[in-house]
Amino acid sequence: MKNLSSLLLSVLCFLLPFITEAQKKYEVEKLNTGINSNGYDEITPVASLDGNTLYFTRVGYPDYVKSLIEDGVEMSVKLGEAEFRAYLANIYTRMGQHKINDPSQSEFNQDIWIAQSLNGTFDQITHPGPPLNNAMPNSVSSVTPSSNELVVINKFEEGGGMKKGFSIVRDLGNGGWTFPEPIGIENYYNTGSDVNMTMSSDGRTMILSLENYDSRGKNDLYISFKKGESIWSQPKNMGNMINSAARETTPYLSEDNKTLFFSSSRRKSASGNDIFMCRREGQGWDNWTQPQRLIEPINSDQDDSQPFFNSATGYLYFASRRDGTSDIFRVKIAPAVPRFVTVSGRIVDPTTNKKVDARILSGAKNDTSYRNVYVADDGTFRLSVPKGMDFTIMAEKPGYIGKEKVLNYRKDYAYFKEKIIDLELVKIEEGKKLELPPVYFEQSTATVKSNSFVVLDELADFMRQHYNVRIRIEGHTDNQGDPDALLKLSEDRAKAIKNYLVGTKRINPIRITTLGFGASKPFSDNDSETDRAKNRRVEVIISEVHEIEPVLQAGSEKMEKQ
């Protein structure tokens, strides 16, 4: 049709105008019976960045995880089957404020299931046990920039108990999962029982659906921004352009952070919930276009909600009640255009070539305010790196020194294989030299050139991160000149670096000593200007490593369902 090609391009780039019936007839596909069970609800489809894994929630299903910890005791073991069933039914009754006799049939019986594509379709279905699932509501809300992490609903305590909110879980790669780690959201408040959220692809922004004192309807959409490694700002209502007097739920933010899908029961919906889409205008987060309802057959005369678009496959996943119960469907609305490259590898100690358990900091180059954290428990990692930009990754672990790597993959190129790289962590030991870029001085002086301050700032950061380390700054020169003058120049240059660290960066002077060697320890021959330039250098040596006192180390640096 006339506008078909422009439509595909606009969807691919998440541009308006929105999908209209005149532009294309879309074919909706109901996913296989391994995902959609007979007579039970499947909800909240969330696809991995590469599109090969689908996380979904099954509701009220007889095969559910019955683990319930209270005061460190597994109640499903302590109580008999009938007694535990009544006990859990009572908990669900209090959560929903209506009588529940059979907990297996309750809407609070929600477990996460995982469908993986081994042969091009979602042909391997697994049902994880604890700690990913338990007897409380469990559901995946969003992926994160780290490909082994998911955001799940609720906060759980290992000794027992649950609070409203969200948590991070990590895939250990062997079928196991870490215990959910809570996400801190300032002044988080939700008066309702339903909650959903989506995290932006850069890990900086969350859009949440919840009910609060300033909500126009039962649920409104709110926005929250990352303030620290695990702290997010107080959710702010996204305003009347997006929110209505009806319910706005299940948001999904596109990978370019420009297009928002969500479901709503507003007046324009044919019946129940429908899926809507709007576009962010400008660089801020306050201006959005008027939400537009997606066309049939994406929306139907029954409830349609929980949209999730995956650019790697071009599929929009969603849940619908068009066949009676809630099932998961998908529809191709754009060509497959992966926006990420999968990078995997090891974290190794180059001295021993052994793997090191650590964490990886990653993010856009020169943007140190926001760093995504990937925890590599077994010394291996698998990350999704955005194409078309300088992206940095660096391994980090106390007692080790990591080296930053900058990755850049072409936006217009299709990468069919994972990129394999190793990240090095060098153990901090006395006598080891810190590998730093050269520090440059004005000719024949001890004045540091301004373009070298960034190197000294990195050294200051290292000193702050490893406050149990003391260093020795050693100055060296070539052999051109009077030996006594060269010795003094090397001493003055070492002192100049110490003065910058102490005076400008506020590093304790007792942690830094200086020493000048003049021309007595050349790095290379002095036969050419190129070799002499290598000898005009400053080296930083770890002189002492002290044990970290536990107290000093610590001081230095409760229900919801989908």
Image (tube, rainbow, N blue to C red):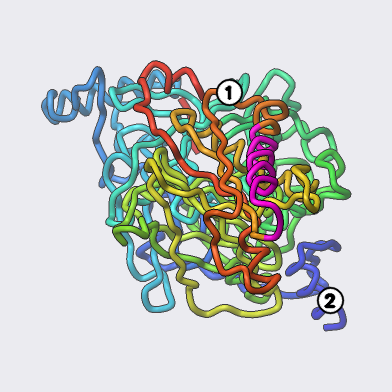
- Tell me the quarter of the picture where residue 412 sits: bottom right
* Left or right: 550, with 524 as reference point: left
| Circle 1 SS class | loop
Comparing 178 with 67, the one in front is: 178
Packing grade of label 1 (10 A; few <14, some 14-19, many >=20) is some
| Residue named by callout 2 | 6
Comparing 422 with 511, the one in front is: 511
Q: Which label was assigned to residue 397?
A: none
Q: Is residue 319 visible?
A: no
Q: Position of residue 93 (x, y in %)?
A: 37, 21
Q: Position of residue 505 (x, y in %)?
A: 68, 29
Q: Amino acid at mark 2?
A: Ser
Mark closer to the chain start, 2 or 1: 2
Q: CA distance from mark 2 to mark 1?
A: 62 Å
Image marks 2 and 1: residues in contact by CB distance under 8 Å: no
Q: Position of residue 485 (x, y in %)?
A: 70, 46
> Image point 60% across, 56% down: which residue?
392
Question: What secondary structure prevails in the magenta region?
Answer: helix
Q: Amino acid at mark 1?
A: Asn
| Circle 2 SS class | helix
Is 139 magenta? The answer is no
Is 497 magenta? The answer is yes
Comparing 427 with 538, the one in front is: 538
> Image point 83% across, 34% down: which residue?
240
**Looking at the picture, does residue 487 appear above or below residue 293?**
above
Comparing 61 with 521, the one in front is: 521
The magenta stretch is 480-498
Q: Which label was assigned to residue 508?
A: 1
> Image point 45% across, 71% down: which residue?
420
